[in-house]
Amino acid sequence: MANARSRQQALADLRKARRRRRVADFDFMEALYRAYVAALFGGAALWWLALRVGGKEVATATVGRVATDGPQIAGAVVAVALAIGLRSGGRGGPLALEAADVRHVLLAPVGRRAALRGPAWRQLRFGAVWGAGLGAVIGVLASRRLGGQWPAWAGSGALAGASCVDGALGAAMAVSGWRLGRRVAGALALAALGWSAADVLLARATSPMSWLGQVLLWPLRWRPGAFGGVALAGLLVVAGLVALGGTSVEASERRASLVGQLRFAVTMRDLRTVILLRRQLAQEGARRRPWARIGAGAGRVAARSKPAVVGTRRAARTGAPGADGSGDHAAGPRYPGSRSVVVLSPLWHRGSQGLLRFPVARLVRLALLGAAAGAAAEGAWQGTTPLVAAAGLALYVAGLDVAEPLAQSVDHATLLDGYPLARGAVLAGLFPASAVAMLVVGALGVATAVGMAGGGTQALAVAAVIWVPASLCGLAGAIISTVQGPPPLFSDSDLMLPPEAIGAKVVLRTLWPPLVSTVGVLPVLAVRASPTDPVAAAVANAVPVLVLVVLVLVWVRNRERLHAAFDLALGRAGAGGRVPDGRGA
Amino acid sequence: MATPAPSVLVAMGVTKSYGDLVALEPLDLAVEAGQRLALVGHNGSGKTTFIKMAAGLLEPTSGTVAVAGEPAGSLGARALLSYVPDEPVLYDDLSVLEHIEFTCRLHGLDDWEDRAAELLSLLGLATRAEDLPSRFSRGLRQKTSIVLGLVRPFSVLVVDEPFVGLDPPGRETFVKLMEEAAHDGACVVVATHQLDYAATVDRCVGLRDGAVVYDGQPDKVELPSLVG
């Protein structure tokens, strides 16, 4: 016993020594500058949000509806957070230890619960602070539309937010420590989501998730029973801490390595690497067998033939057979025993087969993102303007998944260079398959928005008009982000810019892809401003958005040539600038 | 007739799969105290998988691995088994000496300074003991990792590809230290591609595609085919 105590003391001393060294290396001025920048940007964002949200207080009837239905809807968000936590626990999360901690502490004869308690508390503290902060902001914003004292809103929001995040973390730790596995964790997540959905449909708050929603809306209606939600979140935290000792070392080691890389990728603002590592962390690999094989026979034939679409275009330039689209390539060569009737473009085939290998988890995420985009767009139409950004962001994130075939080609530049085509042509050729998938995601958003609006022909017509540009623009933003890659640490053109301008350039480069995605949802605001003829307003505003999508495609197709021309114009081709490879011509 | 030494590392029907991929076929292995065993095989043959399962870093899909009767990865097994990985994993913000101190204390060792000084001196790290390993070369980090593996008490020493990045004197010293450990009664299991080292051990186990294809005394004729 004394031995166990001395080992735990050694562990405490180890952490103390490391903390001491970190404090000694702490750069006070750097931290102060970061806090200053965060406060500046955070304050500006809050100010803007407060201005946008606080147009005017909503009608009394609406407040009553929010008080009645709001807890269940907020509960659905809590259920999603809980489901994410359970899913993470099924894969060994949520703790992300340092690799050295796994090797030196978890492999030492020290009780695992004692070894993991410190990191677990740190994560819970961090989660509580962020959850409380986010909840307080939501509360303050809600106070401006729903009335009431903002401190009360901020307090109830903070309690609900902290309980939600820490409840999810506690659930994850419990699932991980008790080794419930992915299937049980998935079933529990589905049960939580199903219970919450039933609450929403029946307009009754029976689940602990809805009780936390009631906590959020306490300033509207005081329900002491909602404390049950907070208590259950606390119980989940206790369960998680009790179960810590059973956490898998194998999972901890895998996560330690991936999370280390993930943090580095975040530091480098390398979004694509972040996505890939997050998928590895969630063990979200592509399916070995696709859900379906589109034109399987045709695909095999296409692999042995020249590319149909591009080949036809080339034929058009050279006057070769196939130029009119009726040649062998367009009609599809017939091989003995082949079932193929039409030869698909290899790029379309590659794109569609990649998308058809998406695992269930990714499909569910896409469906949720589509629904969230629709719900946010409906909220914007009803008057909460900032929800346009939420809808755009949801479509952007969905686009990052759907643009996977194109992203794979960008990742494997060597393979891309192996095709007898310009890089831009290949990337642009991968767009149609992703566009079809994105339209399916957008359709889920349309269904959600129309459902929330209570149906009606006009709502359906408006949503149908906005559907295509919003979906494609969401994808376009994601494609821009994927194709441009992470910002370079330093580029030649930076030589001519002052430091402030370089910072602004980096921010702009990071923000403009999601901004492009958000542009696709802006017609919603135009529709809102034209209550007499919303469909005409939707059509009028959808056209420029579609033009933007086309421009993005043109940019993807000709990006390298444009850059090469720019470099040549600056006379830097021979001095380290990009050298045109001629393949884009 | 001498009584055979007890087996301190025992694997019974142990397998490891990742989905459809079988990393290790059912493996039965018993390593006696004082025995030096070399695990040889080409890349992906299952050497590291077995080593990590013995260390408790990987969990078997089926079967068991025991260290002196304690399940691998359990508190008791962790006290008895020392693992030197192929890729050194060290804290960026602790010096070599701090690493040693905390490793020893975590293993309940109070009197560690003399042994630490001896190992540091043998491996040429005595003058770098106060430095942060994050600023070391690959070879120096590997040497630090070796010191951490040997400074604590153990009955089983498992080592994965130990000679990568080591200079010839370092390699020679480490081989001697492993011999000493075996002489003192520890069982030493080394996964390696180095045929000259494998030829010197007491027992050689060859793995191919996760299955044992050779188990016996090192055979100079067999060894190249096992590694290649």
Image (cartoon, coloured by chain):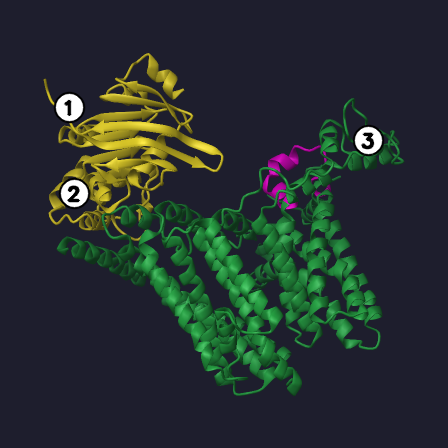
Chain colours: A green, B yellow
Seen at 54% across and 74% down, the residue is: A205
Q: Pinpoint the chain carrying mark 3.
A: A
CB under 8 Å between discs 1 and 2: no
User: x, y percentage for residue A107?
Assistant: 28, 46
| Residue at the spot of label 2 | B116
- Residue A493: percent from left, percent from top: 61, 53
Instruction: Please indicate whether residue A443 sits to the left or right of residue B8 in the image.
Output: right
Residue A332: image tag: 3
Q: Position of residue A98 (x, y in %)?
A: 36, 51
Which quadrant holds residue A415? Answer: top right
Which numbered tag is attached to residue B4?
Answer: 1
* Mark 3: amino acid: Gly
Q: Is residue A566 magenta?
A: no
Q: Are the residues under marks 1 and 2 on the same chain?
A: yes
Query: In the image, which is nearer the foreground, mark 3 or mark 1?
Result: 1
Q: Which residues are magenta?
A: A405-425
